[in-house]
Image: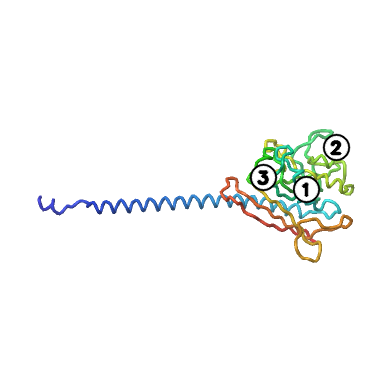
Amino acid sequence: MNYELRTNKGFTLIELITAVGVLAIVLVSAAVIFNVSIDSFRMATANAEIMQKFRVITEQLNSDFAGAIKTKYGQIRIAKDKSYIENSIRYDGSNDEIKDVNSHSIVFFANGYFQSTQQYKTKDSNETVAGNVAAIYYGLANVTNYSAIEKPDPKKKVLVRRQTILTSDTSLTEDFDLDELREYCNTQSLAELNEEDVNDLIKDFPQLNLDEPNDLAMYMAQGVDDFAIEYYGFDSSRRFHDQWRVPKDKIFYPLAYKFTFRIYDSKGIIKEGREFSYIVYVGG
């Protein structure tokens, strides 16, 4: 018995302290690895969200510009001038100073098969309006819940795509002109358009009420800022231009457009967002 008591030793204090220290190191390492894994997952999710928005935007641009019509009016209108933008965007509908606004916009006409998102009254029933020509607008929206005083949160800015179908459907009971910015226009054909009509399509940034279901037809992506447009093919400089430099009496069709914009994830994980440049070729 005495022999067994002498040979069955317990842990010494030093061994116990060492074991606790090793356990603490393991737990801290595990916590660090866990936090790194969570951060990596959140970053990957944010990047996936941004890339999804990028694909939506570029696929729609490709689809629309594939049918772009070469016409004297409406091929491009870029709203870049600061005074123009300040007089056009009012985040809360007031006349207060607008801060941190940077957005170009563009209107062009395209062939394709276009349908309205709503149904409209005809002589016999309510029907979806369809047509083969539409005026298409891209730009940032005037969102009703923005504040004109505070700096707009780029995560809340919305890129919109508005289409106005040119239709000769005589069964529609309501006539809409281009300056009404409805889903269709049945008072003028493409051949009857003039420069004033085209200016009506871009003179105001679209009003977007996120609580209004009908407005959501224009909604493309939230968290898009610094939407800039450049065009290529005006002169021999072989570079893109960001201002419309062609004389009014000259018909000019750009060979390509470059769209540059910054996309933010909805949770602000990538604080500065990601900047993209995308070129759409429209031929000679």
Q: Nearer the viewer, residue 82 or 155?
A: 82
Which sits in the foreground, 89 or 108? Answer: 89
Residues tagged 3 and 2 counted as in contact (Cβ below 8 A): no
Tell me the amino acid under the disc marked 1: Ile
Residue situated furthest front in the rendering: 97
Q: Quadrant of residue 131?
A: top right
Q: Residues within 10 Å of mark 1 (few under 14, many from 20)?
A: many
User: If you read the primary sequence from the N terminus, does the residue marked by circle 3 or circle 2 appear first?
Assistant: 3
Pinpoint residue 153: horizontal percent, then vertical percent: 63, 44
Mark 3, Cα crowd under 10 Å, few <14 / some 14-19 / many 20+, is many
| Residue drawn at x 72%, y 42% as measured from the top left | 97
Q: Which residue is mark 2?
A: 175
CA–CA distance between discs 2 and 1? 19 Å
Above or below 237: residue 40: above
Nearer-the-camera pick, 169 or 139: 139
Q: Is residue 38 visible?
A: yes
**Kind of residue sitting beneath label 2:** Asp
**Of label 3 and label 1, which has the lower sequence position?**
1
Determine the secondary structure under disc 2.
loop
**Residue position marked by numbered label 1 in the rendering:** 136
Q: Residue at x 74, y 43 (%)?
A: 89
Q: Nearer the viewer, mark 3 or mark 2?
A: 3
* Sequence-first disc among 2 and 1: 1
Q: Position of residue 190 (x, y in %)?
A: 86, 48
Kindly report which numbered mark, 3 or 1, lies closer to the viewer in this rendering: 3
SS for dot 3: loop
Q: State whether residue 241 is above or below residue 224.
A: below
Q: At label 3, which amino acid type do we have?
A: Lys
The residue tagged 3 is: 157
Looking at the image, which is closer to me, 82 or 130? 82
Q: Report if the CB atoms under discs 3 and 1 are less than 8 Å apart.
A: no
Q: Is residue 146 visible?
A: no
